[in-house]
Image: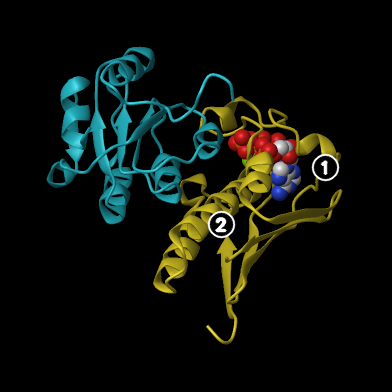
Amino acid sequence: MSESVKLSFPVLADDFSHAGEASGSLKRTLKKLGIDMEVIRRVSIAVYEGEINMVIHADGGVIDAEISAESIEVWLRDKGPGIKDVELAMQEGYSTARDHIRALGFGAGMGLPNIKKYTDEMSIETEIGVGTTVYLKVNIT
Amino acid sequence: MTVSDVKQILNAEYIWGEELESTEIYSACGSDMMSDVLAYVKDQSVLLTGLVNPQVVRTAEMMDMRCIVFVRGKEPDAAIISLAEDRGIVLMKTQLRMFTACGLLYENGLKGGETADV
Ligand SMILES: Nc1ncnc2c1ncn2[C@@H]1O[C@H](COP(=O)(O)OP(=O)(O)OP(=O)(O)O)[C@@H](O)[C@H]1O
Ligand SMILES: [Mg+2]
C-alpha cells in the first residue's frame, strides 16, 4: 500500500441489534486489504468495544479509519453526554450501565480497558454535554 | 477436539453449521458479558453463553471464534442464525446450564487458555 486508505462508517443508535455492524464492515475490509490476521483482530475488538459504547452510552456517531503501510488509526466520534471522569472510566469494572444494558451482555466495565489492551496508542477527548472522541492506533509490524 | 466432539460432549443440537463439524477447537470461553469474552483472545475458540442476541455472533466474529453454544436451551431467532451463517460460525444449543457445560468440556481436555497465576 503506497497511499493510505480512508474509510468512514456511520453508527446508528436507534436499534441495538445493529450495534457492531460498522466494526464488522471494517474487519471485512481489512481482510480484503490482506492485513495480518492478528493486527485485524486487535483493531476489530477495540473498534467493536468503542462502537458498542457509542450505541449504549452516547447516541451513535461516526467511525473514521485510516490505514497506511505502518498502522491503522481509528477515530470514534459521538455527540453523546461525554465522560465525567476518564481515569475512572478507564478502570476495569467501572460502568454506569444499568440493568437493561447488562441484560444485553454489556456493562461489565471492560470495554475501555480492552481498547487500551489491544492497541498501541489510545486517547480519549471528551466534553460534558458535547461528546466524546476515542482515538486508537495499532501498528502494523 | 472438533466441533462435532463439542456437540457430543454437551449433548447439543446443531442450529446451523453441521457441515463445519470437523473444525478444530482449541479453547473455550463461557460468559454472558461480551466484554469479558473480548478480554481474552485465543485461537479457534468456542463461546458458551446464555445470552441470545446478534452481538453474541458479532463478538464471536471479532474474535475469529468458530462456534457458539447456547446453554439452558436458549433459542436464537432467524436474524441471529442468518448472521452466523453469513459469518461461517457454527451455532448449537444444549439444555445444560453454563457451569455444567463448561465443566464437561474442561474435563474432556478443553482449556480456557489461562493459568491460575494470571
Ligand atoms: N462514548 C461514550 N460516551 C459517554 N460515556 C462513555 C462512552 N464510552 C464509555 N463511557 C463511560 O465509561 C464507562 C466505562 O466504559 P467501558 O466501555 O469500559 O464499560 P461499559 O461500556 O460500561 O461496559 P462493557 O464495555 O464491559 O460492556 C461507561 O460505563 C460509561 O459511563
Ligand atoms: Mg463498553
Which of discs 1 and 2 lies nearer the camera? The answer is 2
Q: Ligand 1 within 8 A of label 1's CB? A: no
Please give the name of the residue rendered at 65% of the width and 44% of the height, measured from the top-left corner: A117
Amino acid of disc 2: Val
Quadrant of the image occupied by residue B43: top left
- Residue B71 spot, x, y in % from top left: 32, 23
- Residue B98 spot, x, y in % from top left: 37, 18
Residue located beneath label 2 in the image = A43
| Spatial CA span between label 1 and label 2 | 21 Å
> What colour denotes chain B?
cyan
Please give the name of the residue rendered at 58% of the width and 21% of the height, measured from the top-left corner: B117
Label 1 secondary element: helix
Amino acid of disc 1: Val
- The vertical placement of B55 against A2, above or below, is above
Quadrant of the image occupied by residue B80: top left
Could you tell me if residue B2 is visible in this image? yes
Q: Ligand 2 within 8 A of label 2's CB? A: no
Q: Which chain is yellow in the picture?
A: A
Chain ID for label 2?
Answer: A
Q: Residues within 10 Å of mark 1 (few under 14, many from 20)?
A: some
- The vertical placement of A71 against B31, above or below, is below
- Residue A14 spot, x, y in % from top left: 56, 51
Precedes in sequence: disc 1 or disc 2: 2
Residue located beneath label 1 in the image = A86
Is residue B30 shown left or right of residue A92? left
Question: Which is more toward the observer, B17 or B42?
Answer: B42
Question: Which is more toward the observer, A31 or A77?
Answer: A31
The picture quadrant for ligand 2 comes to top right
